[in-house]
Image (tube, coloured by chain):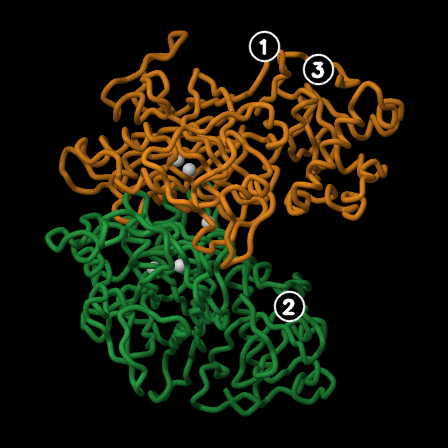
Chain colours: A green, B orange
Amino acid sequence: MEAFLEVDPASDFSIDNLPYGVYSSATRGTTRRTACVALGDQVIDLAALQRAGLFSGPLLSKSPDCFQQADLNAFMALGQPAWREARTTLQRLLSSGEGALRDNAALRRDAILPMAEVELHLPMSVGDYTDFYASKHHAHNCGVMFRDAAQALPRNWLHLPIGYHGRASSIVVSGTPVRRPRGQVLSGATDQPVMQPCAAVDFELEMACVMGTGNELGSSLAVDDAGRSIFGLMLMNDWSARDIQKWEMLPLGPFNSKNWATQLSPWIVTLDALEPFRCDAPLQEPGVLPYLQEKDRHGYDIRLTASIVPDGGDETLMAAHHTFGGCNLRPGDVLGSGTASGPGEGQRACLLEKTWGGKEPVRLAGGGGERSYLLDGDEVVFRGWAGGGDGRRRVGFGECRGKLLPSPAI
Amino acid sequence: MEAFLEVDPASDFSIDNLPYGVYSSATRGTTRRTACVALGDQVIDLAALQRAGLFSGPLLSKSPDCFQQADLNAFMALGQPAWREARTTLQRLLSSGEGALRDNAALRRDAILPMAEVELHLPMSVGDYTDFYASKHHAHNCGVMFRDAAQALPRNWLHLPIGYHGRASSIVVSGTPVRRPRGQVLSGATDQPVMQPCAAVDFELEMACVMGTGNELGSSLAVDDAGRSIFGLMLMNDWSARDIQKWEMLPLGPFNSKNWATQLSPWIVTLDALEPFRCDAPLQEPGVLPYLQEKDRHGYDIRLTASIVPDGGDETLMAAHHTFGGCNLRPGDVLGSGTASGPGEGQRACLLEKTWGGKEPVRLAGGGGERSYLLDGDEVVFRGWAGGGDGRRRVGFGECRGKLLPSPAI
Ligand SMILES: [Ca+2]
Ligand SMILES: [Ca+2]
Ligand SMILES: [Mg+2]
Ligand SMILES: [Mg+2]
Ligand code: NI
């Protein structure tokens, strides 16, 4: 299938992708937030298509307001059959063989905008955000640095997805500058706590899983059904303050070291768009308990920039564990994969690991100097994609970009 | 000041209290949720008073819809001057000297309902929920049981308020039954993980602090200003699964052991109502860093049932710490105090401590048998109040009540 709009083959946003977002357009003189999908370097306004009656399938015709909201939560709550109907409808409307949008000049003016001229927002309202710890390599490396080498990998790590509840209010979209936090750290010089700007700002390269439908409190999702509840994936930067984390995290886990910013790419790439890129999830050794055993293959072959390839990335497993005790998930909730480190030194997905706790600085390309941790003004950019150059159209995530501002005055 | 309605002197809800809630009335044939305050055994409908034009002060007259919502978040976002105007207005309208409501029969029928005939809901929409660990006695006792006696109190405990992010979606109101969770625990017999219903369901008696106004991401609240941002307090039961907690909590903190239910009393008692009951907060030894030092006294003399008296209970300190790194708080966010254990054996505020890890069962009064942890069908009831019997009218919280249902089938 070809789009009637021209799409650069190197674009993340082919007609096989159609990721969901929310935009506003200052050039059109409004701050109103509107649902859209990306196609090449254009955004397609879903509210306009819906008002024109073009979502006329059996499911979406019953929800004529689902794209008239400031976020995608209402659409996501409709469930997988409705998501698939929307995808089929959009691929048809945007294809070269269909005239309903292509030949309607007024609707085209309304519904198709250059991406360069719009502002992109968080596509969903996030009720709760959970971060997991799925990479064995990341967990092992952190264990060596925060505890000791002999017991680096916690024993429970092999048996259950370790995770913690994060802070939903401080989730920001790509492009939002983040401010170096202040906090309490243990001074190495005096062995006493001091309050100062964080001296060890780090990023964590992760994939975020966005829940579409949820579950009732006290019920749970079976591991092989959890995939149907997941709407899609995004890139995530779990900004981290390592010195604050080291001092605060025992016994109840990370708190102020993690709650000052978590950044997401603006597009949700649906699992349906990623379906051609399914692959085996890593083998689980020792075998996990039956409630976590999967019949299907739940990994996706996604490339992340700097040649870092995700190691764990198994969102359905995480969703099943999360709800097994009865915790309810809601549309728009975010589950982070945990830092996506691989086994090699070139595959360490945060500076804590890459510089081995700041002791082995990395040299930036292009004369940017050395870094143990980030300096004010540094910008962190993540990219990720599947396909492209292998006979399949590229399905990409766009970018997750954030610039570090100085700490406020003490 | 006397109310024109009769109020039992033993009631938690004197005219000096006027706690905020949200009700619906099946006897009036509607599920619509409406803002109210409690007075004796009646609820006073704030939407009806507002439609009648009775919130005519300079601040609230500019927000004529603030009580026309299904939750109190819009009212709470108006800030302390508006909260004080509402309190003054309501005390005047409900006093024996004022006829505007007393002498208007139609309005009285609309706006005054017996509490026994309404259903009470969570009064606010909770964006994020944080639980602290403010009782030194609780922190020490848990340290002995989850780690070891030699290093029971983590060193950082003395220097900063330790807390973790909880799960907002599973917060339920008093009266909602909660279901025993299932989960992974380490079997004592085989030293291998097994999946089973939790065998150590516990409660934690806590005070919850409800944020009124918030702060912008990247800014922070000064410790002496944080009190102005807090709307009020509630009773909180942090339901806990101790066997799941013990296996999962290292290194990232409690997760499934805590995210299956957190229960709140239906009424928010405002800080203005609690003002006469201010007292000194416990002395901090060693002294804390300047950003956590307070000029004012921030404790409240609140009694909790079973003669358990809160030990830490210093919410302004917690809010200041939470935002110091730049994390934003939003109206309706909940901060839990942590289990409110005192120094004595009779002041241990959860079964983990009371039964010393299940090893010393407690005998229930009235022939209810012994408990190490809770049995299916057990109901946990918390009560709390200030004043009463000391020449000051009682300012109480009502109750936080929850019944434990059996686990779902495995
Ligand atoms: Ca992380
Ligand atoms: Ca607690
Ligand atoms: Mg973060
Ligand atoms: Mg809880
Ligand atoms: Ni949360």
- Tell me the subunit letter for badge 3: B
Q: Is mark 2 within 8 Å of ligand 5?
A: no
Tag 1 residue: B389
Mark 1 or mark 3: name the one nearer the start of the chain. Answer: 3
Is A212 drawn above or below residue A191 in the view shown? below
- Tell me the subunit letter for badge 2: A
Q: CA distance from mark 2 to mark 3?
A: 50 Å
The label on residue B25 is none
The kind of secondary structure element at disc 2 is loop
Q: Is residue B315 left or right of residue B85?
A: left
Residue situated furthest top in the rendering: B366
Give the image quadrant in which the ligand numbered 1 is located.
bottom left
Coordinates of residue B336 in the picture (x, y in percent):
46, 37
Q: Nearer the viewer, mark 2 or mark 3?
A: 3
**Residue visible at 67% across and 84% down?**
A100
How packed mark 3 is, by other alpha carbons closer than 10 Å (few <14, some 14-19, many 20 or more), is: some
How packed mark 2 is, by other alpha carbons closer than 10 Å (few <14, some 14-19, many 20 or more), is: many
**Residue visible at 20% across and 42% down?**
B193
**Residue visible at 71% across and 38% down?**
B34
Question: Do tags 2 and 3 sit on the same chain?
Answer: no
Is A273 drawn above or below residue A294 in the view shown? below
Q: Nearer the viewer, mark 2 or mark 1?
A: 1
- Tell me the subunit letter for badge 1: B
Tag 3 residue: B7
Coordinates of residue B88 in the picture (x, y in percent):
74, 31
Q: CA distance from mark 1 to mark 3?
A: 15 Å
Tag 2 residue: A33
Q: Quadrant of the C terminus of chain A?
A: bottom left
How packed mark 1 is, by other alpha carbons closer than 10 Å (few <14, some 14-19, many 20 or more), is: few
Say which amino acid is labelled 2. Arg
